[in-house]
Image (cartoon, helix red, strand yellow):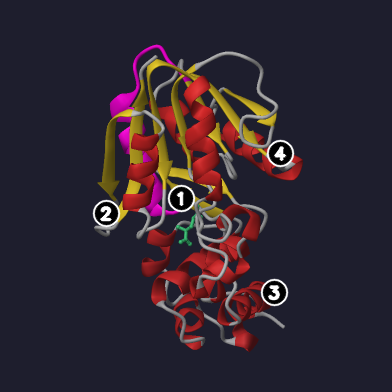
Amino acid sequence: MNAVETGATIGGLLREFGLPRLEAESLLCSVLGCERVRLIARAEEAVDSSRARSAHARFARRRAGEPVSYITGWREFYGLALRVTPEVLIPRPETERLVELALERLPAPARVLDLGTGSGAIAIALATERPGLGIVATDVSEAVLALARRNARDHGAEIAFFLSDWFDALGPGRFDLIVANPPYVAAGDPHLERGDVRFEPRLALVGGEDGLDCIRRIVADARSRLRSGGWLLLEHGYDQKDRCVELLLELGYADVGDFQDLAGWPRVCTGRWLD
Ligand code: GLN
């Protein structure tokens, strides 16, 4: 069957499944291997039957709920195209805020640690913004680290990756800045059963009963891992600001602050360790 027989066109495929335009475009681009801006001018163009079938298959997966990024295999973060698999959280715009706040606090030169790096999003964004940084990134999964390494290579980011449960496998040595987007969703949160989140790894999302297990551990352990004057920056849930700020203050951090994401939710807590 050729394109004439199937009658499939770019414009027709985009309309056919009733998906939101942007999602249909991203999925179709992943089949055609082109950029989204190109599609608009090509609405009338014929699509051969094998590509039309691939597009149908991808549209159907999306209709069944699978996140677009797991179908296409990539996501843009801080202007960088990152590979993603269902083994990692899909990088989100609120985490770009964490990157911005980290950049504002980075001395030069600096040693930086990204805990639970996943796709490598935070570490790679920092590395590409500030070449020459000494960045260490950890994760508990070897498969996840392989993906993060590949992303780092794609972007020429020099990062030392370690298999480690938070700080556990790291050697001695202190950092000027420690960042993490740890799992922080409460175990029973109904949000876990909705939308794209259903397909994401629980390990990267759930932080115990109240969501704060990992945050508590990182805030406690980072004290012996920060140079005097070094910053800790953690992403947290929209309703966890007060508990995060309290925790940082209780454990002796200075310059404690909390910052909103672009949607206006409290999202990143910061504190400074002074010996
Ligand atoms: N922001 C994510 C969500 O609510 C959670 C990310 C995380 O736990 N680090 O889906």
Q: Secondary structure at mark 2?
A: loop
- State the predominant SS element of the stretch in magenta: helix
Q: Quadrant of the C terminus?
A: top left
Which circle's residue, 4 or 2, is located before the other in the chain? 4
Alpha carbon distance from label 4 to label 1? 19 Å
* Kind of residue sitting beneath label 3: Ser
Query: Is 209 in front, or is 162?
Result: 209
Q: Which residues are magenta?
A: 92-111
245 shown above or below 201:
above
Marks 3 and 1: which is nearer the front? 1
Q: Are marks 3 and 2 in contact (CB under 8 Å)?
A: no
Q: Position of residue 69 (x, y in %)?
A: 55, 61
* Kind of residue sitting beneath label 2: Leu
Q: Looking at the image, which residue is at 68% across and 44% down?
A: 144
Residue 262: assigned label: 2
* Residue on which disc 4 sits: 146
In magenta stretch: residue 265 = no
Q: Position of residue 266 (x, y in %)?
A: 29, 53
Q: From the viewer's perspective, is 95 left or right of 218?
A: left
Q: From the viewer's perspective, is 86 left or right of 80?
A: right
Query: Is 124 in front, or is 163?
Result: 163
179 shown above or below 258:
above
Alpha carbon distance from label 3 to label 2? 41 Å
